[in-house]
Image (spheres, grey):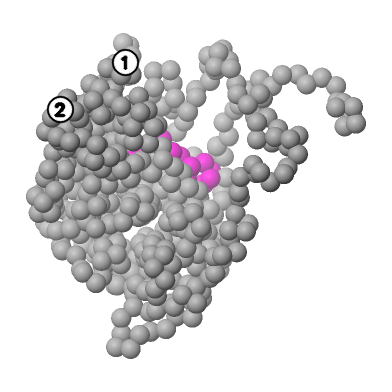
Amino acid sequence: MIRMPKGGGWPILTPHETPAFDHIADAYPMPSVGLGLPPASDGLYHGYEDVDVVPSELYAKYDVKRGLRNADGSGVLVGLTTISNVHGYNKTEHGIEPDDGQLIYRGYGVDQLISAAQAEDRFGYEEVAYLLIAGKLPTHEELDDFRARIDARKQLPEGYLSIFPRATYSHSIMNVLQRATLLLYAFDPTPDDTSPTHEIDVALSLLGRWPRTAAVAHAAHVAEQNDTKLMVPPVREGYTMAETVLDVLKSDEGFTHEEAMLLDVMLILHAEHGGGNNSTFTTRVLSSSGTDAYSAYAAAIGSLKGPKHGGANFKAGDMIEDVAAHVRNWDNEDEVADYLAKILRKEAFDKAGLLYGLGHAVYTKTDPRAEIIREYARKLAEQKGQVEKLDLIASIERLGPQVMRDVRGITKPISTNIDMYTGFVYSMLGIPQDLFTPIFAMARLAGWTAHRMEELYGAGRIIRPAYNSVMPHSGEYVPIDER
């Protein structure tokens, strides 16, 4: 039950009104070791080692494009799009030739879209979202109407909060966002309708609801940890996406216009990145089957959650903090380089052997998103007294590529990508780490919607790639008593 406090304010959910989670531990998957299971069952956990590892030479024999990548690292062409272009190299008769990075939305450079909005001191994400979804820049009237339609759908359905998955045993807000999205299917009278009108209405409702949904999930986790009341943020009409995110997170202390404008830049930079990125391709694969919008977007969230995709933003932030903690003199380039080499040799940080925030599948010389946010990050760092930390990031940017060449023998150009700055910027804005990737998802919804529409009404064929079978001949069936 939700109660309104005296004198107004946020609705309150007391701890006894939230679902009990103790029972989840009993059903949660636990290791089988020590449970007295017969040794014969070990095949469940180790059988794949003998049968599911395909010899590497077979990939070359059958010319398999692993990861949908060509041998030169470029992506396999699987579709055509009018939505955006991610440019980072040129393919010539001599092979892949590095080039400055460009990110273009519907024909407009992302830098142009951001600078135009910033010059007029107005928020630009909604304008960009309209551009991606509708295919053209909106007029004042169209943009006002677009925002009003999102506002009208911000309120969650009646009865939704009583069964909303506010917390999760894994403490993953992305997991909560997936389940919350799928739950909205049950409150939609025509959830399987894939008509253009319904598709747009679903996208508008998620643009309005996801910021509050993610914030409630974060607040629920904090309330559970501290045994306090869960405060459900109210709906604020007239707020942009950037203002909404900061409002539901920092309502008590408030936020500045400058902070919201910087978050708006981050949202624009994350709004779209071509059809070939993993989460967008996931959206297109599911959409090609004709499934409902909620299922497609929930699957895209699951993809973005992965540490090789959207989850890399907080990994980069953690890596920077780790370098800061273990390098005594941040101005000593030799010390910084030596520690980066330890990370690459799997001797430090998370032992994965990766320098997060460096390198990209498409960009070679530069990531335009990193080039843009670097400037804004410095301005905020000066206000927040974080210039020294930003200088350390600059050292990692400058030294990292050469360390990667020395340790790994990498010869291709290595550019800084936006993940190097995402965590740093969000931390300065006071955004909790568990919301870094959900904010990425909120922003990317505009791009996902555009690609879903293009797949539903353009390509018209279910995506069905081919896999060659290389399983060994198993012989005749052996009766179970003779095995």
Q: Is residue 312 magenta?
A: no
Mark 1 and 2 residues: CB-CB less than 8 Å, in contact?
no
Would you say residue 67 is visible in this rendering? yes
Position of 218 with respect to 20 (left or right) is left
* Residue 333: numbered disc: 2
Considering only vertical position in the picture, is 483 above or below 126?
A: above
Which contiguous range is marked in magenta?
Answer: 273-288
Under mark 1, the amino acid is Gly
Instruction: Tell me which residue sits at (51%, 58%) in the image.
Output: 169
Under mark 2, the amino acid is Glu
Residue 200 in the image, given as x and y percentages of width and height: 42, 58
Position of 345 with respect to 327 (left or right) is right
Q: Nearer the viewer, residue 19 or 458?
A: 19
Q: Residue furthest bottom?
A: 6
Instruction: Tell me which residue sits at (70%, 32%) in the image.
Output: 43
Q: Nearer the viewer, residue 293 or 248?
A: 248
* Residue 336: numbered disc: none
Q: Which residue is mark 1?
A: 409
Mark 1, mark 2: which one is toward the viewer? Answer: 2
Q: Nearer the viewer, residue 154 or 189?
A: 154
